[in-house]
Image: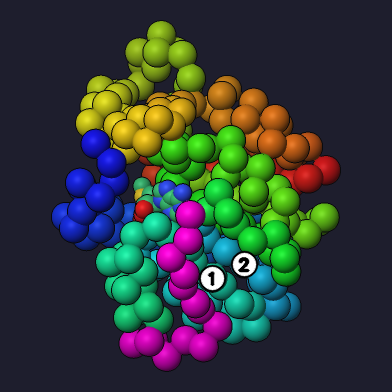
Amino acid sequence: MPYEEFRPEFTTVMDSMSRGLLDGQLLEGIVPLVDGLADRLERGARAADIGCGTGHAVNLLARAFPRSTVVGYDLAGDAITAARAEAAAWELTNASFEILDVTALPPDPPFDVVFAFDSIHDQVDPAGVLAAVRRALTPDGVFAMMDIKAATRLEDNLDNPLAPLLYAISTLHCMTVSLAHGGAGLGTVWGRELACEMLEDAGFGAVTVHDVPDDPLDSLYVARLT
Ligand SMILES: C[S@@+](CC[C@H](N)C(=O)[O-])C[C@H]1O[C@@H](n2cnc3c(N)ncnc32)[C@H](O)[C@@H]1O
């Protein structure tokens, strides 16, 4: 089943799942996990959020770092409409949104930082998206990829009490939206080992993996070119 079949309900369901975490942890817990990022955003950086959904992360970043410009990309028109409405309500002039398939993320002008919040594992072409992110970063840029905290091998997830939920979400949503277009179908539980391998294959030279404060479901992968 393609993504469109899950909408319009998916848009608000996803927003309600991620909004609380972003409100609580994006600025205080997630950004500080990336060395030097808060300073860079403070000074003024060009940032993107790929698969931004309703854009709450973009708007929080743009409000907190007025010298930076932040652009959110998503395939879903209804999510982008909601994102723009929040940016307008907050009177943000440094947040913008575009409907775009991020396999075609524009490399020029480059970004200092690209964020992805749980938006890589259900891609049709995740390897293509990771390669596009690498091409779109400045040489000292950083990719901050929040994605599901799990191991790649089923047998390595047996002690994880959340594993049944994750595999259920995977088969009922994340795999099918990718497979519907003949995609990779990585699924929710692609896991740390495969994620690191794919980041390396995309040309990232240094990857560190962090727990996300107050969030047992996600890890933050911090990937740089060197
Ligand atoms: C699991 S949702 C996460 C949304 C948002 N980041 C959040 O945390 O609420 C994944 C999002 O990625 C978007 N998406 C999937 N493939 C995409 C692509 N190739 N280009 C742009 N957006 C894409 C979907 O439309 C969806 O909004």
Badge 1: residue crowd in 10 Å (few <14, some 14–19, many ≥20): many
Question: Is any part of residue 154 visible from this angle?
Answer: yes
User: Mark 2 is on which residue type?
Assistant: Ala
Q: Is residue 202 left or right of residue 154?
A: right
Residue at left 50%, top 46%?
146
Viewer-proximal residue, 134 or 29?
Answer: 134
- Residue 52: mark in rendering: none
User: Which color mode does the image show?
Assistant: rainbow
Residue at left 49%, top 77%?
96
Question: Is any part of residue 33 visible from this angle?
Answer: no
Q: Is residue 221 left or right of residue 112?
A: left
Residue 95 on the magenta span: yes
* The N terminus, quarter of image: top left
Task: Indicate the position of residue 69 as horizontal and vertical percent values.
Answer: 61, 77
Residue at left 52%, top 37%?
126
Residue under circle 1? 71
What's drawn in magenta, residue-wise? 88-101
